Image (spheres, rainbow, N blue to C red):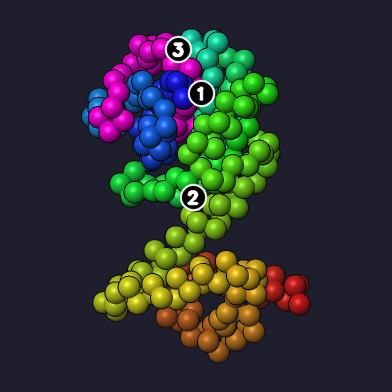
């Protein structure tokens, strides 16, 4: 399938990084984005044409990969005829069935990674979760996935939804904790870099042991002396509630696992 032709619908973080990975293996024939600025930038990187009108998107492609906001798909896709083509989306929590009205050959190519447009990404290390409406389409999706990643998993829409939920806790929520921590340090004019060694060590440990075994800190033993001192230092009531809830949950969950 070296002659596979692909269209990218979208120009955001996932569309950009996946498009770059795909372009090293296959021909990207066109990019769609609602704004000319975004569409032209990505098209230039991928060496293809672009359009800002989905109705004018080329028919000369085998696979159309949608990387747009979930809420946009319902308005966008009905404007284009995808019959006889393979139509994929890249969302974590969106069921495959949302594409069923547009073609018989549809599926999912979901990258399990925190992806930013401006940060270079080695896609070969990104787990790809795949699903398709039939075996023939699944074969094409797997060919695409295996062409850009060394980790490809067959999962159902329900399973993918659970993986996406877990990823929100593991990545998005964790990153928000970094932001809170950075704000606490900034209040005393201290740099966030102070935390990088402990962040790196915590992340490294879970490669070697379960997170419950890697957990440290006052919440494990429910040290009220330290906990109360911390709470008194927090002036933002919302952050205080987060601290209390997470502390209680750490203590209770680890107590249950003893």
| Mark 1 crowd level (few <14, some 14–19, many ≥20, 10 Å Cα) | few
Q: Are marks 1 and 2 in contact (CB under 8 Å)?
A: no
Distance from disc 1 to disc 2, alpha carbons, whole Å, reads 22 Å
Q: Which residue is mark 3?
A: 80
- Which residue appears at 45% of the width and 50% of the height? 114
Residue 224 appears anywhere in the view:
yes
Residue 69 belongs to magenta span: yes
The percent position of residue 158, horizontal first and vertical second, equals 68, 39
Residue 72 appears anywhere in the view:
no
Q: Which residue is mark 1?
A: 1
| Mark 3 crowd level (few <14, some 14–19, many ≥20, 10 Å Cα) | some
* Depth order, front residue of 75/115: 115
* Depth order, front residue of 162/149: 149
- Left or right placement of residue 194 versus residue 218 in this view: left
Circle 1 or circle 2, nearest the eye: 1
Mark 1: secondary structure: loop
Distance from disc 1 to disc 3, alpha carbons, whole Å, reads 25 Å
- Which residue appears at 25% of the width and 29% of the height? 44
Residue 173 belongs to magenta span: no
- Left or right placement of residue 256 versus residue 66 in this view: right
Name which quarter of the figure residue 235 lies in.
Answer: bottom left
The percent position of residue 154, horizontal first and vertical second, equals 66, 38
The answer to whether residue 162 is above or below residue 59 is: below
Q: Which residue is mark 2?
A: 125
Q: Are marks 1 and 3 in contact (CB under 8 Å)?
A: no
Circle 2 or circle 3, nearest the eye: 2
- Left or right placement of residue 11 versus residue 158 in this view: left
- If the image is split into quadrants, where does the C terminus sit? bottom right
The percent position of residue 101, horizontal first and vertical second, equals 59, 15
Of label 1 and label 3, which has the lower sequence position? 1
Task: Tell me where the magenta segment starts and ends, as one range.
Answer: 43-72
Name which quarter of the figure residue 155 lies in.
Answer: top right
């Amino acid at each position: 399938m070296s002659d596979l032709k692909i269209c990218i619908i979208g120009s955001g973080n996932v569309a950009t990084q996946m498009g770059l990975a795909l372009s090293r293996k296959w021909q990207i024939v066109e990019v769609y984005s609602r704004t000319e600025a975004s569409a032209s930038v990505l098209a230039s990187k991928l060496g293809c044409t672009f359009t800002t009108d989905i109705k004018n998107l080329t028919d000369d492609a085998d696979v159309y990969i949608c990387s747009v906001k979930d809420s946009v798909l319902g308005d966008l896709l009905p404007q284009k005829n995808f019959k006889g083509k393979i139509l994929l989306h890249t969302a974590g929590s969106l069921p495959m069935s949302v594409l069923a009205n547009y073609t018989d050959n549809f599926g999912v190519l979901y990258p399990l990674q925190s992806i930013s447009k401006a940060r270079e990404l080695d896609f070969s290390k990104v787990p790809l979760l795949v699903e398709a409406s039939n075996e023939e389409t699944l074969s094409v999706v797997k060919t695409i996935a295996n062409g850009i990643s060394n980790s490809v998993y067959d999962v159902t829409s329900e399973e993918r939804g659970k993986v996406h939920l877990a990823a929100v806790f593991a990545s998005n929520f964790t990153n928000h904790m970094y932001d809170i921590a950075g704000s606490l340090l900034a209040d005393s004019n201290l740099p966030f870099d102070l935390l990088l060694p402990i962040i790196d060590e915590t992340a490294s440990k879970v490669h070697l042991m379960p997170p419950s075994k890697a957990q440290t800190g006052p919440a494990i033993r429910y040290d009220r002396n330290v906990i109360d001192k911390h709470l008194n230092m927090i002036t933002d009531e919302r952050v205080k509630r987060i601290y209390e809830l997470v502390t209680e949950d750490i203590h209770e969950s680890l107590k249950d696992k003893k």
